[in-house]
Amino acid sequence: MRGMTRYYHQRFFGDTRATAGAIVLLFVVGFWSVPEAFLLVPIVALIGANQTAFDASYLIMARHYSATLEDEINQSMRRSVLVASKLEDCYLFPLDEKKIVTVGWGSGFSWFGWMTGFYTLLGAAAFVFGIALGWPALTEAGGVWSTVYLVVLLAITSGSLVAGWWWFVRGEGERRLRMVLESEFGQRTPPSKVTPLSG
């Protein structure tokens, strides 16, 4: 599970670099000579947003499982030998609390949350600028192609937001993890609320 958390960071920044590189390239091509390239920016931004959220869903799963295993080991040792899940809960973002993907609020907000929000806001800005800069090319094309582009873009954007809200903000993903882990290991206290065992 710790290997999965390491792999998440590798994949997240790999996917972020690939998305950012593709968006910058499309802007360069659009300003250079092909304004239709601007219209691909929102698609690439959505792909990047969905992919990095998918990466985060793996991190959340790995953290839930590793926290449960640490609890089991600590209970069997009758002392807090493993505390990585507690550190992650207070330093990165809390499990089992409302958040937008990995962005907690209030006391759950962290630099980890800021970085997630930072990349999300940059992606949203690129999405908007891509449409604004590509709008003349879209209206010039006119007809059915412009309509199809806008309908598809609206559908995948709305679908991404609704599914993300359901899975992350409403907590469906973590609810499913809790259901399986509690059926196998019993009720687990979130790491931030665990009282250290006395040795």
Image (spheres, rainbow, N blue to C red):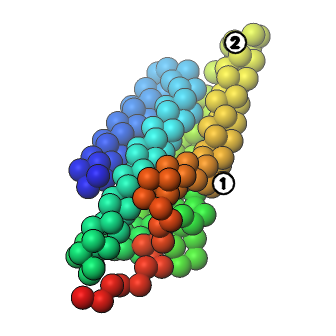
- At label 2, which amino acid type do we have? Trp
Front residue (pair 85, 115):
85
**In this picture, is 2 found above or below 141?**
below
Mark identifier at residue 100? none
Q: Is residue 187 shown above or below 134?
A: below
Asked if one can make out residue 170 in the rendered structure from this viewpoint, the answer is yes
Q: Residue at x 54, y 36 (%)?
A: 46
Task: Residue 159 in the image: state x and y as whole percent.
Answer: 67, 34
Mark 1 crowd level (few <14, some 14–19, many ≥20, 10 Å Cα) = some
Quadrant showing the C terminus: bottom left
Circle 2 packing at 10 Å, graded few (<14), some (14-19), many (20+), is: few
SS of the residue under disc 1: loop
Which residue corresponds to mark 1? 170
The residue that appears at 58% across and 57% down in the rendered structure is: 100
Q: In front here: 171 or 127?
A: 171
Q: Earlier in the sequence, mark 1 or mark 2?
A: 2
For residue 198, what is the image quadrant? bottom left
Q: How much space separates mark 1 and mark 2, taking CA atoms?
A: 36 Å
Towards the viewer: 21 or 186:
186
Q: Amino acid at mark 1?
A: Arg
Instruction: Choose top left, top right, bottom left or bottom right for residue 83.
Output: bottom left
| Residue at the spot of label 2 | 145
Label 2 SS = helix
Could you say where residue 182 lies in the image, as x and y percent from the top left?
49, 57
On the image, the x and y values in percent for residue 123 come to 51, 45
